[in-house]
Image (cartoon, helix red, strand yellow):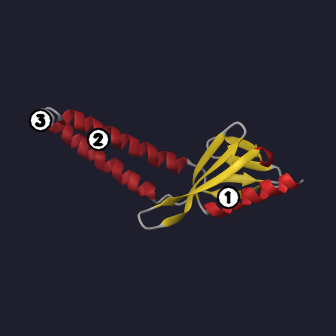
Amino acid sequence: MEKKILATKGPTGFVVGEIIGMISTGIVGIMWLFMGPRIPIMPLFSLIFIGASIFCGYLAFSNIKNPYEMLYYDEEGIYLNYKNNEFIAFKDILYVKQKHSHSRYHTHEYGHIEIMTKDTKYKIGVIDDIDNVAYVIRSNIDRVAKE
C-alpha cells in the first residue's frame, strides 16, 4: 500500500500581511513607549501594541513552519502530517466537513477541514483544493463501509 498525497498547504499570501502587521504594530508600540512619560496611558497602549506585534509574528512563523504536504492516504486511512504524525482509519471517521476561506466578495478554493472520529475532532487548515480533499475522504469512507 503506497501512500498518496491527499492535501497540500494552501497559499501563504497572508503571511506577508502578518509580517507587515508585526512590523507596523511593533513600530507604533515602541514609539508610544517613548511618548509614555508625557501621556499617562501611553505605556499601556504601547504594551498592547507590542503584544499584538508578538502575536502577529507567532501567526506568521507558525504558518510558515507547517509542512507543504499535510495529509496522505492509502487503502486503510488518512495520515496527518500536520502537528504530529497520526493515523485515522476510514472506518473510524464519522463525518468530514470542509469550510472555505472567504474574503469580502470571494470564496477561495482553500480552507480548513474537520474530521470527526468516535474519540476526537481534528481541524486541519489552510488546505488547498478543499472540495477535492473532502470528496476523496468521503468516497474512501463509502468504499470501506461497503466492504
Whether tag 1 and tag 3 are in contact, CB under 8 A, the answer is no
The Cα–Cα distance between marks 1 and 3, rounded to whole angstroms, is 54 Å
Q: Taking the image as drawn, is residue 1 in sight?
A: no
- Between discs 1 and 2, the one toward the N terminus: 2
- Disc number for residue 95: none
The quadrant the N terminus occupies is: bottom right
Secondary structure category for the residue under label 3: loop
Q: Nearer the viewer, mark 1 or mark 2?
A: 1
Give the residue displayed 64% in from the left and 43% down from the top. Answer: 122
- Between discs 3 and 2, the one toward the N terminus: 3
Number of marks present in the image shown: 3
- Between discs 1 and 3, the one toward the N terminus: 3
Give the residue pinned by disc 1: 134
Give the residue pinned by disc 3: 39
Categorize mark 2 by other alpha carbons within 10 Å: few (<14), some (14-19), many (20+): many
Q: Where residue 142 appears, x then y in whole percent?
A: 80, 56
Amino acid at dot 2: Phe
Categorize mark 1 by other alpha carbons within 10 Å: few (<14), some (14-19), many (20+): many
The Cα–Cα distance between marks 3 and 2, rounded to whole angstroms, is 16 Å
Q: Taking the image as drawn, is residue 93 in sight?
A: yes
Whether tag 1 and tag 2 are in contact, CB under 8 A, the answer is no
Q: Where residue 82 appears, x then y in whole percent?
A: 63, 46
Give the residue pinned by disc 2: 49
Against 115, residue 103 (above or below) is below
Amino acid at dot 3: Ile
Amino acid at dot 1: Ala
**Is 14 in front, or is 146?**
146
Residue 32 falls left or right of residue 128: left
Q: Where residue 91 appears, x then y in whole percent?
A: 80, 46
Give the residue displayed 44% in from the left and 54% down from the top. Answer: 15
